Image (tube, helix red, strand yellow):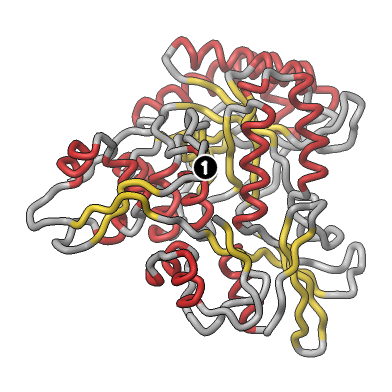
């Protein structure tokens, strides 16, 4: 259930209303200060159906076997276990949650998310138990096809394995300044000899580090390289598939074949959809750092993109890209001058609480927002909550998509992963991990 906070309500009152633990309600929604609920704030309320009280010496494996479930599903229902690292006698574990009458978990869609190697451990631990694939962002390459490695990925790769998530190597043509280099793309996609060298290096790295798949994220592809890019992805897929790996491609959010511009002109939805094993449609950044204040992923615009995408690509190959962040814009907005700052979704609610703001919800965009004043300057903040995530998750079933991919996993949003787990019954495509 999703509860929207009214004036004067407290965490204790809301917990009592639904008959749930106040401590778990706070934990699930990352409420640090019980006195700072925000009017309009959306809370995820999960009602346990079956609870197990841990006995001295019990293991997760034994508990899972006793209830006919898996260790990973128990961890998904009780994410605090990733913090504890062990069981404690007397603590309560949720085995399963209540569902509405007639509601049953269907097959779990693919759930992916991008992360940089320097992500905070406590943040990445909130999402890894639910992920099918953790996308490590990112590897670069030189004009000669040599790989440019990211910061040491060892910890992140090891932790993904421990918490049951597969790992995906992300390839991008990023410069040291973090800018996409279209010239580097052009030289690569038009030279098969360099492609062979790059493929060899990718296969070597993937085998050594234990990656399970490859993701190609090339943005600002020149229109003149449109067909060559498709041919490159097709070549890469052939090399990767032969070695047991799959290839996905990230796509800018287009509405039509004719859509041009630096982001869209070089992206052939039909061609890339056929060349790759799967695609991720980056359905976000309508509201962005230098853009007009608005929702990052307004649902009405996302639908336009998905209507086009499924007309060109098999829906079973498509992952819906979902943002895990928002923006805070100072007002008035001046094009070319105003710069918004990125805010996390939990951080946005805390900011609303600190400034005494009321959160509102835009029905067309299916996104929350609020305004506040600081130092004489008015601000507007658009972000995501469990209502907006519910709307986006429902699109996956509606369009028959492969699943979802989050940009990115660098900000905490525990309720999002718990919501996914409740709606889809847990991402059992992942492994069991290495739980003690």
Q: Nearer the viewer, residue 131 or 7?
A: 7
Q: Nearer the viewer, residue 281 or 203?
A: 281
Residue 118 at x, y percent in the picture: 46, 55
Q: How many marks?
A: 1
Look at mark 1 in the image and give the residue it sits on: 423
Residue 268 at x, y percent in the picture: 78, 22
Tag 1 secondary structure: helix
**Residue at image point 33% right, 59% down:** 80
What residue occupies the far bottom of the structure in this picture?
375
Residue 61 at x, y percent in the picture: 18, 41
Give residue 247's quadrant in the image. Answer: top right
What residue occupies the far front of the structure in this picture?
101
User: Above or below — where is 169 with respect to 180?
Assistant: above
**Residue at image point 33% right, 33% down:** 431
Image side of residue 309 versus residue 39, left or right: right
Give residue 126's quadrant in the image. Answer: bottom left
Q: Which quadrant holds the N terminus? A: bottom right
What residue occupies the far left of the structure in this picture?
57
Q: Nearer the viewer, residue 45 or 116?
A: 45
Q: Residues within 10 Å of mark 1 (few under 14, many from 20)?
A: some
Image side of residue 140 versus residue 430, left or right: right
Give residue 226's quadrant in the image. Answer: top right
Image side of residue 352 versus residue 419, left or right: right
Q: Nearer the viewer, residue 421 or 231?
A: 421
Residue 403 at x, y percent in the picture: 57, 32
**Residue at image point 38% right, 71% down:** 23
**Residue at image point 51% right, 50% down:** 419
């Amino acid at each position: 259930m999703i509860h929207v906070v009214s004036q004067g309500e407290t965490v204790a009152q809301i917990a009592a209303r639904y008959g749930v633990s106040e401590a778990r309600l706070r934990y699930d929604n990352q409420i640090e200060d019980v006195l700072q609920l925000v009017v309009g704030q959306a809370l995820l309320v999960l009602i346990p159906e079956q609870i197990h009280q841990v006995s001295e010496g019990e293991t997760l494996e034994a508990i899972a076997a006793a209830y006919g479930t898996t260790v990973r599903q128990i961890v998904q229902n009780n994410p605090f276990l990733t913090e504890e690292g062990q069981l404690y006698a007397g603590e309560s574990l949720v085995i399963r949650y209540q569902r509405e009458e007639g509601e049953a978990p269907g097959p779990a869609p693919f759930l992916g998310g991008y992360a940089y190697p320097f992500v905070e451990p406590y943040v990445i631990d909130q999402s890894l138990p639910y992920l099918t694939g953790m996308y490590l962002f990112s590897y670069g390459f030189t004009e000669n096809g040599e790989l440019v490695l990211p910061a040491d990925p060892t910890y992140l790769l090891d932790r993904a394995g421990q918490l049951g998530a597969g790992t995906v190597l992300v390839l991008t043509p990023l410069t040291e300044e973090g800018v996409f280099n279209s010239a580097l793309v052009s030289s690569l996609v038009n030279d098969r000899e360099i492609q062979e060298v790059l493929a060899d290096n990718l296969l070597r790295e993937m085998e050594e580090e234990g990656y399970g798949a490859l993701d190609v994220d090339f943005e600002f592809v020149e229109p003149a390289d449109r067909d060559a890019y498709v041919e490159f992805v097709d070549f890469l897929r052939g090399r990767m598939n032969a070695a047991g790996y799959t290839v996905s491609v990230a796509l800018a959010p287009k509405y039509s074949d004719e859509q041009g511009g630096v982001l869209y002109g070089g992206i052939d939805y039909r061609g890339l959809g056929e060349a790759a094993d799967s695609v991720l449609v980056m359905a976000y950044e309508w509201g962005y750092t230098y853009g007009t204040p608005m929702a990052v992923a307004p649902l009405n615009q996302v639908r336009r993109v998905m209507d086009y995408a499924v007309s060109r690509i098999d829906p079973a190959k498509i992952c819906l890209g979902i943002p895990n962040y928002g923006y805070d814009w100072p007002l008035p907005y001046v094009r070319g001058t105003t710069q918004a700052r990125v805010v996390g979704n939990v951080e946005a609610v805390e900011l609303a609480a600190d400034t005494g703001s009321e959160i509102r919800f835009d029905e067309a965009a299916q996104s929350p927002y609020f305004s506040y004043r600081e130092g004489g300057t008015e601000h507007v903040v658009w972000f995501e909550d469990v209502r907006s995530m519910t709307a986006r998750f429902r699109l996956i079933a509606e369009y028959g998509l492969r699943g979802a991919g989050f940009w990115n996993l660098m900000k905490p949003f525990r309720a999002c992963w718990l919501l996914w787990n409740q709606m889809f019954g847990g991402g059992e495509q992942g492994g069991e991990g290495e739980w003690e």
